Each structure stands twice: as structure tokens, then as C-alpha cells.
Image (spheres, rainbow, N blue to C red):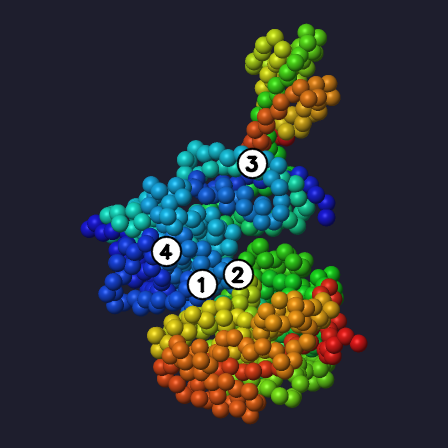
Amino acid sequence: MENKKRWICLFVENEIGVLARVSGLFSSKSYNIDSITVGTTEDTSISRMTICFTSDDKTFEQIKKQFNRSVEVIKVVDYTDIPIHMKEILFIKVNHCSEKDKKELFRIADIFDISIIDYNYSSILFECTQTEDRNNALIKLLQEKFLNRIEITRGGVVATEAIGISNR
Amino acid sequence: MKISGAELFVKALKEEKVDTLFAYPGGQAIDLFNALYGEKDIEVILPRHEQGLAHAADGYARSTGKVGVCLVTSGPGATNLVTGIATANYDSVPMVCFTGQVSTSLIGNDAFQEVDTIGIVRSICKYAVTVRKREDLAEIIKKAFYVARTGKPGVVVVDIPKDIQIALGDDTYPDEINIRGYKPNTDVHHGQIKRALSVLNNAKKPVFLIGGGVNIARANKELTKLVELTGVPVITTIMGKGAIDTEHELYVGNIGIHGCYAANHAISECDVLFSIGTRFNDRITGKIEKFAQNATIIHVDIDTAAISRNIVVDIPIVADAKKAINCLLEKAKPLNISKWVEQIKQWNKTYPIKMNDEGMSPEKIIKSINKIFTKAIITTDVGQNQLWTTQFLTINSKKQLLTSGGLGTMGYGLPAAIGAKIGNPDKDVVTISGDGGMQMNIQELATAVVNELPITICVLNNGYLGNVRQWQEMFYKKHYSHTCLRYRKSCEIACNKPNKNCPEFVPDFVKLAQSYGAKGIRVTKSEDIEKALREAKKEKATPTLIEFIIDRETNVLPIVQPGNPLNEMTLEYKGEE
């Protein structure tokens, strides 16, 4: 069966051990989580998770069902094919930059609409809050030219249902 | 009024109508035990090992339909309970296990007898939680019982730190609980029932495949009505055995790798497979691509996650088995399938499950049990003893079979029988075990003796871990690798031929039983089988262990070899040519 990228949103009890329960479900099925983000909601007794992983249809159905029957999971929403807004925070540090490199990096920042938030004579720090796909594209671009000189910190995907337009 | 956490614990048990508690004390549970001191409304049973304790609570729960309740201490108490938790949860047995824990201030410090109990059991139970505040205790216990017994039943573990047992707090226990993440759906979708019935009514070769869900829902009468109304033959899984009287004319037999010929062939040839309360475990499907490949499959299950997990289902119905069957009864009608029914009967006549008549065969032993124990609960251990029992045991409304079907836990039989007898003092309780499994919880003989439980303990002794030995014989070139229980240092290291000079078996089960204060009988000839069973049945307050010395290399047949479809069965095996 075909593997495909999936996103789900879980509303869970904000309790000790719930994250372990959720992640345990993936490991018990031998599936790797691409990213997982957790934070409390407007109701502090509820946490909201956005989980991104790759699986076939059958396993995905199983995982959703298992979550639905978990006592600690309040609601499961499948974000794979619905209009959502999705963002991921990404820091990229580029080290050992020449003057020429820096010029190039400023140009990239301009075109990709990302901020340079820190800087010294040889290094530059980007902060990008983009969709996961755009972040991937940026990393790919930088790796071509600055291989072994970049340091990447990714925050994982955060998503919410769209109201009018979708951005994923 | 302010009461301690321990006092609230006892109050909660009473509110939940717990009359029996399976409990083993320890340092971090001592306050809970103190609150139980002199308590008259709750009978506290002290097994001799926490694994035995959990299986006893499990046997009690399966046989009574009530929640089995365990109480053990932290650390080793909790880890010893683990196998019992997994066993019960796998077979959807409602249980609540309370574990003591070190004080909240010490959690995470590697304190004496501290383990992360909840971290260990999380993946093998329905719900597990540590109580972190005294004010949460009542609600958590209420939640535990509710979750354990509703929906698809299962095990809930409640870990109670020592300071919470001591802390004073409110004495109220809630009447109701609302869990926002847990809303078990047991209602039936009538549209799906209609679809299922229209498929069933047009079937030429339909069968019912019944799993443990029907027994758990205690829908035996309803199922029998449905079967008699429609005339559709019934096949069961091991866990579903007894859902309908095994002597019923429409009962075919068990399906599976040791199922009967007629059942496996009927499944392979049917055009409609109407299954209720089974999760299509690999032990019953054989080669999955060939499983019921001509059939439209209808699947009733309480657990959405069981549907289309192992096989693709055409008509899923998520519902409690009893409610679903009652809905089906409203609209079901007789089918005209006499030719099909006749064919299945013919298969059963031509290829019955039968063992060699010579000597003391397990078939003879189990058929004698059928004859002598007519109103009884039968428990089994795991291995050949279990498979033979599921092949030859007759069950009707007066009898029940308890067996570890999902996890396949050796050591289950004896403690489960103890729990069953405690819950059903008026019924005879028989356990059928092997010489291997018997030794895994042999210490519970003491529990049976001190509680004056006249259970009949049948040990089929072949001196081997027989089921694995059978596989070694059939599929591993007779390499009896470490499955012989009579092996000693003096033996050849690579032995594959038991003979007259094999060392004596240890222990001497008869003497061992006697040393515990139980009765011990050894049976070596088939003509003595019934006499021994009758003698055991007569006992009023003493357990009887009967050791049956059976042929060392008897196999469970028929068998579907690994990787084969269900209808390619090995009916006879006479060794490699």
C-alpha cells in the first residue's frame, strides 16, 4: 500500500503521561513520527497536538481508531485532506560566511520572505515561519551551496483548520 | 468528614459493590491494607504470587461477569502483576488493579521499590493513571471501574502513592462520572443491520463465525435464537466456544490452525461470513489472502479498531454483540440452505477430530470430564492441554470455559480456577493443565488449600513443553531443543527420542499436592480416569490434583501448517518419511 504524508490534530487531557501514551501508540505499530507539537489550549486542562507522520491508508485508519478509543484523547481531527493553515518554525544558522556569501544570504532572505534575526562577521541566523514544504525547499537550497556550514533547528508543524482560505 | 485516602479506597470498593479483593501486601500498600483490617463486607484473598493473584481476579471476573479487583504493592508487586494484566486485557476482561507507589515526593528518585508502574503497563491495559492529589482519588477510582466495565471491557491500573493513602480529605464518592474522551458507543446502526440481513437472506452458503465478544456480552441465548431462526451453521473461535451449546445440531466446531475440518472448510467455501465479536487473529485465519475468499464479510464488533484491521470487511457493524443480535432477531428469517448444512454435517462425519484410541489419550480424559462434570467451569492452561480441551470439551448453558486466548499465558489455569471457584462456590471447577504450565503458578495450590476450594486440577503430564515440542517435531527436524522437562545433566545434549531410560520427572506432583494439604492422585491407566475424577468431585473443601501420565509424543491434530490456507490441513502425522 502506498505511503503518504499525514497530519492529525489531537485534543488530549493535559496530564502527565498522555504524550507517552500517544507516542507509544506509534512505536507499538513501528511507525516513526515526523514531527509532533504540543501546547495547551484556551482551556488549560486540554492540550492540542499536531502530529505529522508517513503511513499507508490501513495503518492510518488503525492509528485514528486507536486514538479515538483512548480515554485520554478527547477528539481526533484528520488534517490530511482538509483546508488548514499550517506553519512550522525553523531556525537556520549559516557559519563561515564570506562577504559574498552574506550578500547571497540577504538576497535569499528577501526573496523567501524570511527574517535574519542574528548576525556576526561570519555567521547569520534565519528565522522562518513558513509551511513545511517551503521550509523544506529553503533547506534544500541552502544545502546546495552551504553544505556542512548550516545548522538546522525545526520546531515541528502547527496547524489549525482554515476559516476562508487554506495555506498548507 | 475528613477520612484518609486508604479509608476512601475501602469506601469506594464498597460503593462499587466489590465483595472480593485479590490482594498481596507490601510496604507501599500497607496503609491500604490497614484500612481493610477486620473489614467484613469485602473478602480478601491472599494468593501466593502476584501473577497468580491477577489470574485469580481474572478467573473471578470472567466467570461472574463482575469486575475483578487486585491490590498489590509498588515495585516488584506491580511488575509481578504485569503478565496478569496483559492476559486479562487481551481477552477483554474487566479488571481494576490498584498498585501502591512511593510517596509523590520520592517519585523519580529511584526510591526503594519504586518503578514507573504506569509507564510499564500503559501499552497493555485500557487505561492507567497515577493519583497525584488526594482530592482526585474518588473520581479516579470511579473512572477506573467505569472504564473497566463499559465498552470493550479491559484492565485499568490505578497507582496510589503512599502519601495519598495517608492524606486526609473529603469522604464523598461520586455516583456518576463523565469522561469527555471516553464515550463507548454500543448502539446499533439500523441501516447496517438491514444491509447485513439482506446479504444474509440471499446467501446460499452462509456461516456464523462467533468470537469471545458474544460470551463477554452474555448473549448466548440470543445467539441460539438467531441460529435456530435462520438455520445458519455456527463456527466458533476458541474464545467463542460455548456461545452456543456445543451439542447443538447447527454447531460445527472451532475454526483455526487446530480447528476442525468441517469448520475450516466451511469458512473457506462460504459465500457469506457473518462474524460477531472476533478480531480475526492470525491463529484463526491461516494464510490471510485465502481466508473466506469467496465470502461477503459482515463483522459485528464493539471495538471500531477491530474492524478491517486483519481482514477487509464488507459490512461493519460497531455494536455490543447482544444489542446487535437482538436487532437482527427482529427482522431475521429462515434461510433455505439445507444442502449446505448437510454438506457441513457430512464433513464433520467424515473427518471428525479423533485421537488414537490406545492408552490414556487426552481425548479420553477430556471426554470423561464432560461426562462427570455437567455443571462446571473449566479453565485451561496454555499449550496442548488447552488445544485438546477446546477440541473435545462440550459446553452448554451450565458450563463455561476460561482460557487465555489472546496472550496465551502459561500458568493461567490454576489461579483462574481459584478465582472462578471463589466467585461460583456452587459450581464445580476443573482446571486442565500441562506439566509445564502447572509449575508456573504451582504456589497457588496453597491458596486453594487455605481457602478450602475443592477444585479438580488435572495435569496432563508428558514430560515435555508439548506444543513447542510438536512444532519441533513437525517443522524443525525433530530438534527437541530445551523442551524436555525430564532432561538432566546425564542426558545426551541433543536428544530427540524419549525412551524408557529417561530420568524421572520432577516434581512428584502427587507428593507435592499432599505437602500443600491437597489430595494427590496419579492415573496411569485409562480405566482409572473416571474413578479419579469422581473422587475429586466428591471433595467438599480440599483441592485434588490428578496427574495423568500421558504418552510423551502425542500431537494436537489436525493442524494447519504455518503459511497454509485454512483448508489445507494436516489430518494425520506419522513422522517424517
Q: Are marks 2 and 3 on the same chain?
A: no
Mark 1–mark 4 CB contact (< 8 Å): no
Residue at 47% x, 52% y: name it: B121
Q: Nearer the viewer, mark 4 or mark 2?
A: 4
Q: CA distance from mark 4 to mark 2?
A: 23 Å
> Which residue lies under the disc numbered 3?
A36
Image location of residue B526, percent across then percent down: 57, 89
Secondary-structure class at tag 3: strand
Does mark 2 fall on the same chain as mark 4?
yes
Question: Which image quarter: residue B325?
Answer: bottom right
Residue count near mark 4 (Cα–Cα under 10 Å), binned few <14, some 14–19, many ≥20: many
Query: Residue B265's spot in the image, x, y percent?
Result: 72, 74
Q: Chain of mark 3?
A: A
Q: Residue B332: percent from the left, percent from the top?
A: 60, 72
In the figure, is residue B387 to the left or right of B9? right
Mark 2, other Cα within 10 Å: few <14 / some 14–19 / many ≥20? many
Q: CA distance from mark 3 to mark 4?
A: 35 Å
Q: CA distance from mark 2 to mark 1?
A: 15 Å
